[in-house]
Amino acid sequence: MFPPLYAILDPSLISRPIVPLAENLAGAGVQLMQLRDKHAGGGRFFAQSRELAAALGPRGVRFIVNDRPDVAVLAKSGGVHVGQDDLPVEEARSVVGSGAWVGVSTHNIEQFRSANATSADYIAVGPIFPTASKENPDPVVGLALLREVRQLTAKPIVAIGGITLETAADVYRAGADSVAVIRDLLAGEDPARRAREYLAIAMSAGK
C-alpha cells in the first residue's frame, strides 16, 4: 500500500534541525518524506540529502529528493521527484535506475495523461487548495480534477497544495492515495503529533 502521508521537508519552514525532525516524523509512522529546498546551493542540498537518507533508510522510510536525480543517486536516496520544468520522467529514471522511485508533478488533465504514460511510480496532482508554500504556485485545481484523474490510472495519486487536517478526509475521498503536506505539518509545535493525526484520518478513510 502506498504511504498515505507524504511529508515534504522544507528547511525554510523549519526552525529546528532537520534530521531529528525527520526522525521524529518517522517515529510517528511517516513512511515517505521528501527534501525540497529551492534556495540551497548544490553542496548544501547534497549534504542534507545524504544525512536524511542515512538517517531514514534504516527506519524503513523512503526518502525522496526533489528536482535532482543526480543528488538522489549520490545521496543513496529512495528516489527523485520532478516537476514540469525538470528532467522528464524517463530521463530521470535513466539516472536513478529501476530500483528507485520517480514521482512527477502535474497541474492539469493533459499533464496527468502524459505522466500516466511514463514509468512514474506515482503522480502528484495540485495545488488542490490555495498554498503559500510555493513562491509562484500553479492555478488551484480543486477536488474536481482529483476525481477526474482517479478514473484514468491505477498508479498512486498524491494530492498536494494547501491540504490541512480539516480537509484531508475530503481529499482522500476524492481519490488520493496520499496527501503531501508541508506547512500544516511543519509549522506547529509538534509535527510528530500532527503526523499521527493525519495518519488516523487516513486509516479512517481506508488508506
Image (cartoon, rainbow, N blue to C red):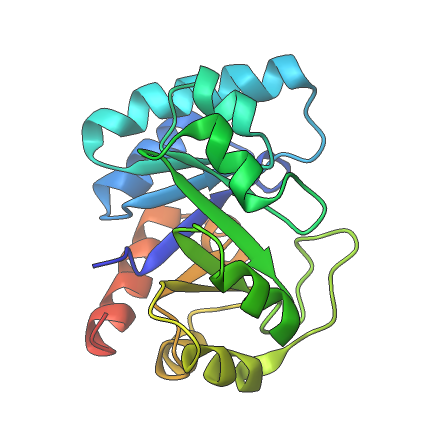
Q: Residue furthest right?
A: 136
Residue shown at the point (42%, 78%) measured from the top left: 150
In percent of width and height, residue 186 lies at 49, 48
Left or right of 150? Residue 14 is right
Name the image quarter holding residue 36. top right
Left or right of 98? Residue 171 is right
Q: In this rendering, does residue 5 appear at all?
A: yes
In percent of width and height, residue 184 lies at 50, 59
Q: In this rendering, does residue 17 appear at all?
A: no
Of the 4 image quadrants, the one containing the C terminus is bottom left
Of the 4 image quadrants, the one containing the N terminus is bottom left
Residue shown at the point (48%, 23%) measured from the top left: 49
Residue shown at the point (58%, 56%) measured from the top left: 105
In percent of width and height, residue 127 lies at 62, 67
Front in this rendered view, residue 76 or 27: 76
Residue 119 against residue 55 in the figure, above or below: below
In percent of width and height, residue 58 lies at 20, 25
Left or right of 114? Residue 6 is left
Name the image quarter holding residue 122. bottom left
Front in this rendered view, residue 5 or 65: 65
Residue 172 against residue 187 in the figure, above or below: below
Residue shown at the point (26%, 27%) measured from the top left: 57
Residue 12 against residue 186 in the figure, above or below: above
Front in this rendered view, residue 24 or 39: 39
Q: How many marks?
A: 0
Name the image quarter holding residue 92. top right
